[in-house]
Image (spheres, grey):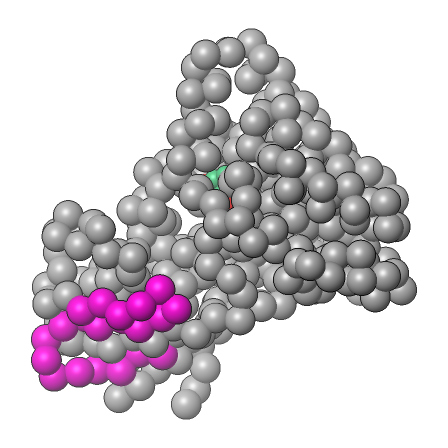
Amino acid sequence: MTAVASAPAKAILFGEHFVVYGKPAIATALKRRVKATSTMNDVGEIRVRSMLGYSRIPLPCTDPHLYEHDPHKHIIFSAASVMRLLNKHVGVDILLESDFPYGMGLGASAATSVATIASVASLFGSISRDEVFRLSLEAERLVHRNPSGIDSAVCTYGGLVLFKDGRIERLDEKGYDSSHALRFMIVNSGMMKDTGSMVMKVKARGESSREEFASLAEMSEMLTMQALYAIMCSDLARVGELLTLNHGLLRRLGVSNDTLDAIVYTLVKNGAYGAKLTGAGGGGCIISLIDEARSSMLFDALCNYEAFTSSIEDDGVIIHTE
Ligand code: PMV
């Protein structure tokens, strides 16, 4: 028996890092997805295949320490925890296919765990989206110890969202008219980043320069709330300006580098409304708000980098019928 589910990529527009400390953030699901195909096997193992390679772990997989160095640890944990929840204990083969890069700040680890949880669950019955979110957040804790939950939330529920203190609010439910679709260009710096070590670096920075960290956190909150207002009014020029300001703030925090700064500069110089690094930083992707009419000029200016455009993806996790 086979079940298929998919979950979208995500990009944080405002407030990353400070969201870990309870400040608000705005993020969007993107029109790129990862698909998880789960099939029962009779060898009593969880077996995972993805672009990260191939893993096989015998059931019951109850102790994550036994597979803590496996690149698929969050997937094995996700599959094992959904089976525990549904009181099923059978071997499962999981195939993960993604049309967006891994380790680049687009939420691949959360999206793969969300898609896995939904597909394994639908082999046996179903679980609610809230359960998918909860289990994915537990799996994310294996990837880096203190996730805010924003990645799992966006990959589960989709849309353009405000996130604070573990709670998500979709902006279309607050009156945002998504027909004024924001158009994004996402540029991959090609530099892999490690969320866990960037989050630790920021924590150390907060401990060594408390006052400066507190004022950066205040600024991040102010930018996010001003951006929320600008998005609701569809004031694209203002949203873009705030994005670039947010990049400056993250640079000050120490999570940017020359390559990311150069991509932001190129985007803004070539007519993007604004641009910033997205996610943990240290590498990964840049997100920019653009006018569709300028996209070919922007692609040309950044021809040395992998790039794609996307509007807001309304759907979060989807169960596909085979
Ligand atoms: O780079 P990503 O996609 O792993 O995003 C990390 C976002 C942080 O705010 C830096 C951490 C978090 O858990 O919110």
Residue 251 visible in the picture: yes
Q: Is residue 276 left or right of residue 236?
A: left
Q: Is residue 98 left or right of residue 13?
A: left
Is 229 colored magenta in this rendering?
Answer: no
How far across and down, in percent of the image, does residue 166 sit? 46, 41
**In percent of the image, x 58 and y 13: which residue is there?**
212
**In percent of the image, x 56 and y 27: which residue is there?**
254
Residue 122 visible in the picture: no
How far across and down, in percent of the image, does residue 237 sit? 87, 44
Q: Quadrant of the C terminus?
A: bottom left
Q: Is residue 227 above or below residue 120?
A: above
Q: Quadrant of residue 24?
A: top right
Q: Quadrant of the N terminus?
A: bottom left
Q: Is residue 62 left or right of residue 253?
A: left
As rendered, which of 103 and 74 lies closer to the eye? 103
**In percent of the image, x 31 and y 73: which residue is there?**
49
Q: Work out which residue is located at the far front of the displayed protein and give it.
A: 304
As rendered, which of 39 and 195 lies closer to the eye? 195
Main SS of residues in magenta? strand
Q: Is residue 93 above or below residue 177?
A: below
How far across and down, in percent of the image, does residue 143 sit? 34, 47
Q: Is residue 232 above or below residue 10?
A: above
Is 41 colored magenta in this rendering?
Answer: yes
How far across and down, in percent of the image, does residue 186 sit? 67, 56
Q: Quadrant of residue 299?
A: bottom right
Q: Is residue 320 left or right of residue 64?
A: right
What range of the chain is rendered magenta? 37-56
**In percent of the image, x 62 and y 21: which residue is there?**
216
